[in-house]
Amino acid sequence: MPVHYIYLVIAVIAETIGTSALQASQQFSRFWPSVTVIIAYSIAFYLLSLTLRTMPVGIMYAMWSGLGIVFIAIIGYVVFDQKLDLPAIVGLVMIVGGILVINLLSNTSTH
């Protein structure tokens, strides 16, 4: 796996941790979840900057945000008991499909 994809995957994980901590911080009123938000997003943005060395910003951002949306929806369902209805699940599947199309069929995933 090329290193820019490793950076991107770790950035998605960091963003997912940061967004989960954002929910747990209760509008930055809890100290440790708030610190986790800052650290996780700092890691995510640093790794995204490294990813931009070899990937176009639009493609990188589509993959980062799309995967983040899917992972956060799953975490919201499992951890925070936030329900997903059928249209939400269909939309999430479409996001994953879009990411697969970009990576499997497009020549624009790197420059």
Image: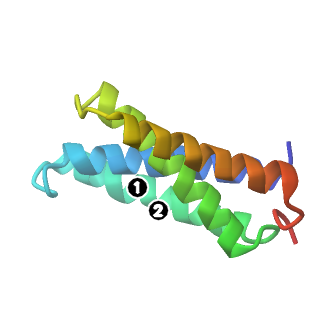
Q: Residue at x 31, y 36 (%)?
A: 76
Task: Name the residue furthest front.
Answer: 87
> On the rendered structure, is 46 left or right of 89?
right
Q: Position of residue 16 (x, y in %)?
A: 44, 45
Q: Residue at x 57, y 49 (%)?
A: 95
Q: In this orientation, does residue 54 appear?
A: yes
> On the rendered structure, is 11 left or right of 111?
left
Q: Nearer the viewer, residue 99 or 21?
A: 99
**Looking at the rendering, which quadrant does residue 109 occupy?**
bottom right
Q: Position of residue 5 (x, y in %)?
A: 75, 50
> On the rendered structure, is 101 left or right of 73?
right
Q: Is residue 44 above or below residue 50?
A: above
Residue placed under numbered mark 2 in the picture: 42
Classed neighbour count for the residue bearing mark 1: other residues with Cα under 10 Å, few (<14), some (14–19), many (≥20): some
Is there a contact, CB below 8 Å, between mark 2 and mark 1?
Answer: yes
Could you tell me which secondary element the residue under label 1 belongs to? helix
Residue placed under numbered mark 1 in the picture: 39
Q: CA distance from mark 2 to mark 1?
A: 5 Å
Classed neighbour count for the residue bearing mark 2: other residues with Cα under 10 Å, few (<14), some (14–19), many (≥20): some
Residue type, numbered disc 2: Ser
Quadrant position of the N terminus in the picture = top right
Q: Nearer the viewer, residue 86 or 6?
A: 86
Residue type, numbered disc 1: Ile
